[in-house]
Image: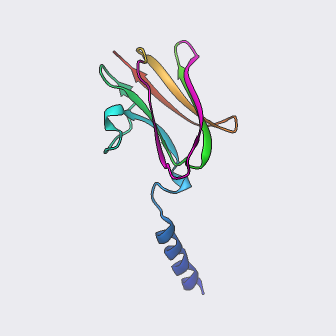
Amino acid sequence: MARKCVSWLVIVLVFTGTGCETSYNRGLSTIRYSDVGSTYSAVHHFGQGETPTILLCGYGGETITHEVINIVTATIVKSSTEYVPKKNFYRWYPLHDLPSSGYVVRLKQHGSVVDTWKFSVSK
């Protein structure tokens, strides 16, 4: 009986997906805008000519708010709330024209912070 249960569990995992498409792999990071749509790596520091881009993974079908906060001045410099369509597993938000400073992205759902990510810009 135990083998049948394990076999069914393996079949379910194979057919439902075990990669980034599951809710277990939600995430928030920043990438270079030039990397959108291609292979990318999370980036914590952006230099001259690079555009930081917020990457959300796994929030399709939900309403989220992201706030970009300047760490030095403790002010929200960008904020957006939207419903992410269920079919959209990845969502990108370019942050053009940020001055040199340290920043934190705060991701909220239902008014509560669910994730944060720090990055800096040096121009």
The residue at the point 58 percent across, 16 percent down is 75
In the image: residue 74, left or right of residue 96: right
Q: Which residues are magenta?
A: 73-97
Applied colour scheme: rainbow
Relative to 109, does residue 46 appear above or below in the rendering? above
Q: Is the N terminus in the top left, top right, bottom left or bottom right quadrant? A: bottom right
The residue at the point 34 percent across, 43 percent down is 37
* Quarter assignment of residue 36: top left
The residue at the point 31 percent across, 33 percent down is 34
Q: Is the C terminus in the top left, top right, bottom left or bottom right quadrant? A: top left
Depth check: give the residue in front, 24 or 84: 84
Relative to 29, does residue 118 appear above or below in the rendering? above
The residue at the point 32 percent across, 38 percent down is 35
* Quarter assignment of residue 48: top left
Q: Estimate the x, y position of residue 27 in percent, counting from the top left.
A: 50, 44
Chief secondary structure of the magenta span? strand
Q: Estimate the x, y position of residue 67 in percent, counting from the top left.
A: 57, 27
Is 77 included in the stretch rendered in magenta? yes
In the image: residue 108, left or right of residue 16: right
Outermost residue on the top side: it is: 73
Depth check: give the residue in front, 45 or 53: 53
